[in-house]
Image (tube, helix red, strand yellow):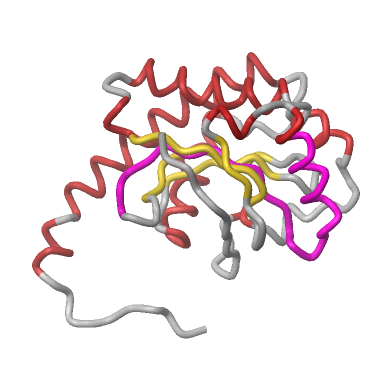
Amino acid sequence: MTEDVVFPISAREATSLGDAYSLYRKSRLLLKQVNAEGKVRFGNVVNGWPDDGQVGDVVRKHFRYHSRFMLAIRGQSPIGLLFGLEADPAGEATFTVWLEADPRYPEIRPRVHALAEASGLLSSGWSLGHDGWQMVERRARTVNYPTIDSAVAWFMDCFGDLEHAGLFALQGELAGFPSTAEESGSDATPDHGEAGDASTT
């Protein structure tokens, strides 16, 4: 596999190391809190929340392969819940939550879209992905959330939307049919890619 890198190392890249490390520490702390609260509030409807000690490893894998700080929760379901920090297509820092599935199983996407549309998610800042891995997604600009508590609350609101829409129930319903956790972005593998429309609030 050929790595997509260009030399030489620029001065901008070198001086950004400190910022990258600071962002990693902030993201890890935030996602530990989101994971801990999500496990308490939604652990009965979503399986696979990582242990606290695993959060840093998963976040580092996503940064290594995808230039983002994310957690992925799937359990044994083909539907994965991903959430964290990622630049939007315009390069702006955003918090994001999405559901994904391997596009080799196209029968899943229409069911997700139907539930999202019927529950009114599209009027609450969510958007639909029509190709690739992503099926439904919500974004928010990080600068709009000045404290860690306000950021955690945004993620909990997103999870509540997904539960209300019946999408967490669908994730559980499809558990084991098929299980694609080892093949997908839940493991942050380098060959995994996502697509889909994104809305930023």
In which quarter of the view is residue 113 placed? top right
Residue 14 or residue 133, whichever sits in front: 133
Whole-percent x, y for residue 59 in the image: 46, 45
Residue lying at 61% horizontally and 25% vertically, measured from the top left: 159
Q: From the viewer's perspective, tell me whether residue 45 is left or right of residue 49.
A: right
Number of marks in the image?
0
Whole-percent x, y for residue 78 in the image: 79, 49
Start and end of the magenta stretch?
91-115
Q: From the viewer's perspective, tell me whether residue 14 is left or right of residue 82.
A: left
Residue 12 or residue 139, whichever sits in front: 139
Furthest residue in direction bottom, as rendered: 2
Q: Please say whether residue 114 is one of the residues in the magenta stretch.
A: yes
Whole-percent x, y for residue 179 in the image: 83, 52
Q: Please say whether residue 152 is one of the residues in the magenta stretch.
A: no
Whole-percent x, y for residue 131 in the image: 66, 61
Residue lying at 63% horizontally and 43% vertically, measured from the top left: 136
Residue lying at 63% horizontally and 15% vertically, measured from the top left: 40
Where's the C terminus, which quadrant?
top left
Residue 45 or residue 196, whichever sits in front: 196
